[in-house]
Each structure stands twice: as structure tokens, then as C-alpha cells.
Image (cartoon, grey):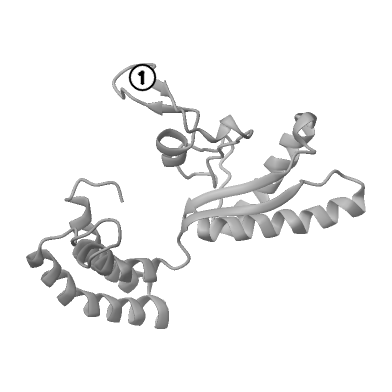
Amino acid sequence: MLGLFQELGPCRISDPTSINGTSKNPYSWNSNANIIFLDEPLGVGLSYSRHGQKVGTTEEAALDVQAFLSLFFQTFKSFAKNDFYMAGESYGGRYLPVFAGTTLDMNARNTKRGLPEINLRGVLIGNGVTSAFKTMESYYTYQCTSIPGIGKPLQPIGTCVQMRKALPYCMEMVQSECLRRHDSIGCTGAMSFCEAALGEPFGRLDLNP
């Protein structure tokens, strides 16, 4: 929804209190391409099921995405020959490689069955998450060192001192509970501590990450 309503969608929300408080986005990608915004997997965001279906893994979600795309291009045949790209950001760094791989695998099966292929030409990943733990570790550097184009650190020195003290403890707990022991309760506690010590200070800055 960030991509749809703040970045590259056809409209921006200019007045969230109004029934139609939108304005045209002059930088929308649909100036140059046809775009599908897909809210997935099932149960995430505003998506829901009517018959109690659940999706528990990225691999399961990939099958749903592939099925949706197959149905879409069979229904709207005029788009089927266009070059098709999958794009996403953030956790898309995990989703998109799996979604694209599943689509290519299914293309190979569809060819054998005489079914149309999805004309997937590439994948675009912006600021993708590939490791939640590495992302968490980078919070201190991002907020407390000088960044080219931004200048001075975002946080005051006192906050940075507190974050620097918490960082090794955070990483030690994550390594122990999440990566070595795979303890769900311990890992949840570790991530909660890390988010409070390293993530919440950014939230208090009232800036767009």
C-alpha cells in the first residue's frame, strides 16, 4: 500500500478524512506501463478468504500468485504478450525470487500441457529485505553515522550511545535464540528487545524511513 498510495500508484491520498481525498500522481508508473497491485499473500493486508483458506509459507503464496496471474492473462488476453515484470520492495526481497521461480517452473509445465505461458521478463526489487537480522543490525549505523546526502547523524548523541550499548546484546540474543536454538519464545523476546532499542528511536523522529 505504500507503493500504491505514496510512491508509484496512479493516485495519492491527499486528504485521508475525505471520501475521495485523492490527487493524481504525476510520477505514476502507469504513465508508461500497465500495473497490477496485488495484496498478498492471503490474510495479509486487506486480503481475506471466503472459505477459510490459509497461507503459511512464501512457497504456498507463490502458487496463489502464479494461479492469479494465469487467470488474469487468460481473462485479459490483450495483455498476455506484453513483457511482464514482477516488482516489490522491503519483504519483496524474499517474496519475489520465490514468486518468479515458481512462475518459471509453472511456465515449463504449461508448455508441456499446451497452456499459455506468463511472459515474465524480469524482477525489480527496491530496498529489499534479505535478512531481517542484518536489517536490524544496520539500524544503528543508519541513524548514528553521517550519511552521504543527508549529513549529520539523525539521532542525538545520547540516543546513539544507548543504541551502541544495546547493539551487541541484541545481536548476541538474535544469534543464540533465533539462529542457533530456533526457540520461538526466545527469538520473539530477542526481536522485541532489538526493535525497542534500535527501531523505536527512529519512529520518534517522525521521518519516513
Residue, x 40% and y 36% (percent of image)? 6
- Residue name at image x 22 percent, y 68 percent: 145
For the point 31% across and 22% down, the residue is 15
Question: What's under tag 1, amino acid-wise?
Answer: Gly
Residue 52 lies, in percent from the top left, at 56, 41
Q: Quadrant of residue 169?
A: bottom left
Q: Is residue 57 visible?
A: no
| Residue 27, horizontal then vertical, whole percent | 47, 33
Residue 92 position, x and y percent, is 51, 54
**In terms of depth relative to the viewer, which is nearer, 132 or 34?**
34
Neighbour tally class for label 1: few under 14, some 14-19, many 20 plus, Cα within 10 Å: few
Depicted 200 relative to depicted 185: above or below: above
The relative height of residue 164 versus residue 206 in the rendered view (above or below) is below
Q: Secondary structure at mark 1?
A: loop
Q: Nearer the viewer, residue 101 or 138?
A: 138
Q: Which residue is mark 1?
A: 21
**Would you say residue 205 is visible in this rendering?**
yes
